[in-house]
Amino acid sequence: KKSASRKRSDRIKRMKKAVNYAMLLEELTVSTKGMPAEEGEEEKEGDMPVDKHTREEARAYASWMKANLAMEQENWKLAVEEYTIAHDLCENILGSSNGGEGQDKMQQLELQDFFTTRANKVIAPLLRYSMYELQEKGVATESAMNASNTLQRKAASSGSSIEFRDNSIVVESTQLKMALMKVADFKKEWEEE
């Protein structure tokens, strides 16, 4: 039987290997050349092998993996920085997925759902936990404070949080979010009358 410290050591070793592969994937999306030009066509300078969306996906994945490793190693500052990058990239991908060529409406909706879920249900809680651990250690970095403020603003603007006694409470339930949006609409209508 392996001891707990040995299992953790093995887990960190595997995560380092996964981070290296993720960084290699990210590097490949920007460093390799595109398809070779066919006969009669000129090679374009600066041709990228993949589109911007794929490069951002690879960057987000690499940042997410780096943050997971940093979290396992209890390097909270690096975890906050990398989770922030991954979260922002997922938000960018979500904002820029306007249905490129060859993408039908259903594929676009699936991509939006995937990146919304990834940003809000996977990365954001890990980012909040890492920020909490960083604050518990007494280290308040500028990037951690910016990340915290950004998460609070996004939650407030999307109607997924409520303010109570100077605290912002994130609402996770979809039904509750819908009810809060209805209340806000009724309040707005009532104020207009």
Image (spheres, rainbow, N blue to C red):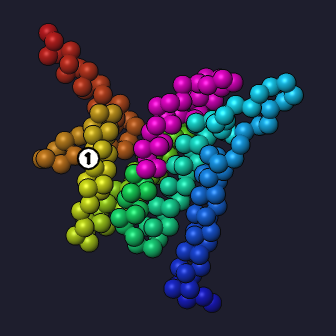
Q: Residue at x 35, y 30 (%)?
A: 178
Between 123 and 41, which is closer to the camera in this rendering? 41
Between 138 and 191, which is closer to the camera in this rendering? 138
Kind of residue indicated by mark 1: Asn
Question: Would residue 63 appear left or right of 74 to someone viewing this image?
Answer: right
Queried whether the magenta region covers residue 10, the answer comes back as no
- From the top left corner, tell me how far across and down residue 118 is, in percent: 50, 46
Q: Residue at x 31, y 50 (%)?
A: 147
Question: Would residue 23 appear left or right of 36 to someone viewing this image?
Answer: left
- Quarter containing the N terminus: bottom right
Between 112 and 53, which is closer to the camera in this rendering? 53
Residues packed near mark 1 inside 10 Å, few (<14), some (14 to 19) or many (20 plus): few
- From the top left corner, tell me how far across and down residue 144 is, in percent: 29, 56
Q: Main secondary structure of the magenta part?
A: helix
- Quarter containing the C terminus: top left
Residue range (magenta) = 85-112
- From the top left corner, tell me how far across and down residue 167 is, in percent: 18, 48
Q: Residue at x 55, y 55 (%)?
A: 62
- From the top left corner, tell me how far across and down residue 69 is, in percent: 50, 67
Above or below, 181 relative to 193: below
Choose top left, top right, bottom left or bottom right for residue 157: top left
Above or below, 182 relative to 168: above
Q: Is residue 148 visible?
A: no
**Which residue has dot 1 on it?**
149
